[in-house]
Image (spheres, helix red, strand yellow):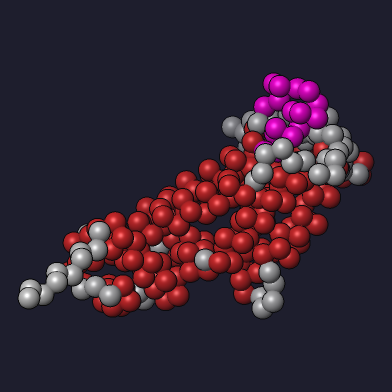
Amino acid sequence: MGVGRTKRMPRAVREQQMLDAAVRTFGQRGYMAASMDEIAELAGVSKPLVYLYLNSKEDLFTACIRREAAALTEAVRAGVRPGLSADGQLWSGLRAFFTHTARHPDAWAVLHLQARTHGEPFAAEVAAMREEIVAFVTQLIAAAAREAHRDPDLPEHEVAGLAEALVGAAESLADWAGATEGVTAKQAAATLMNFAWAGLGNLMADLPWTAPEEDAEGDAERDAEGERHAGPAAVPAAAPEAAVEPVAAAAPQAG
């Protein structure tokens, strides 16, 4: 009676196992300290097989970044439920973001800590992911403003700054939540909603914050002082203009 042959694991499955092991190792030990021997052992394969599948440590790290960036982006997109009020969409998106980063702390460490500090190629991969998320958030805010004002020509770049600030705050808060015992994804999302939505809600209600008059006068004086001290080649400062109000939309309705 012949001995049964062991079923060979598909290449795609084996590769995902290697990536799982690599994300865990890079996330916990850091890119420089992680070794291919350690990753191979954790994946249950030989080191030559890791090199055969993924070429080098640099290529392996890049593959980890791309996989985890795609997973995070997809989680945020899938978490935002169409048809909700503006604050409801923001809430669902933030819940999805913090839930994903809490469930995958090693992946978040790879994306937010390791990839940004170990060379331009890695940082560029993360920057591309961040740009996609910022663009998505920009579209959400702009769509809410357009709907409220019935203005289909409202340019998205007017709310891009708000999206940048919101994404940056979410990234910092994810780090804080991960390092603070007992903070849940829901609590982290609620913290950011309490911080951000009061301001965004006023913008949606066409109630932007404006600088006090004395601050505006001080700006004019500083501009004039800059003109006096500017060299011959300096471009003269423009006369102060009326403040450009941020994009505004109607106050969100209870979902």
The relative height of residue 99 versus residue 25 in the rendered view (above or below) is: above
Q: Residue 101: percent from the left, percent from the top?
A: 57, 63
Q: Residue 144: percent from the left, percent from the top?
A: 74, 34
**Residue shown at 58%/47% (left/top)?**
78
Q: Where are the magenta residues, as a range?
A: 140-155
Q: Residue 7: percent from the left, percent from the top?
A: 20, 66
Residue 26 falls left or right of residue 174: left
Q: Spot the residue most to the front.
A: 1
User: Closer to the camera, 16 or 50?
Assistant: 16
The relative height of residue 172 versus residue 156 in the rendered view (above or below) is: below
User: Closer to the camera, 78 or 40?
Assistant: 78
Question: Does 219 appear in magenta?
Answer: no
Image quarter for residue 182? Answer: bottom right
Residue 66 falls left or right of residue 153: left
Q: Which quadrant would the C terminus be assigned to in this image?
A: top right
Image quarter for residue 59? Answer: bottom left
**Residue shown at 58%/45% (left/top)?**
77
Q: Spot the residue most to the right.
A: 213
Q: How many marks?
A: 0
Q: Which quadrant would the N terminus be assigned to in this image?
A: bottom left
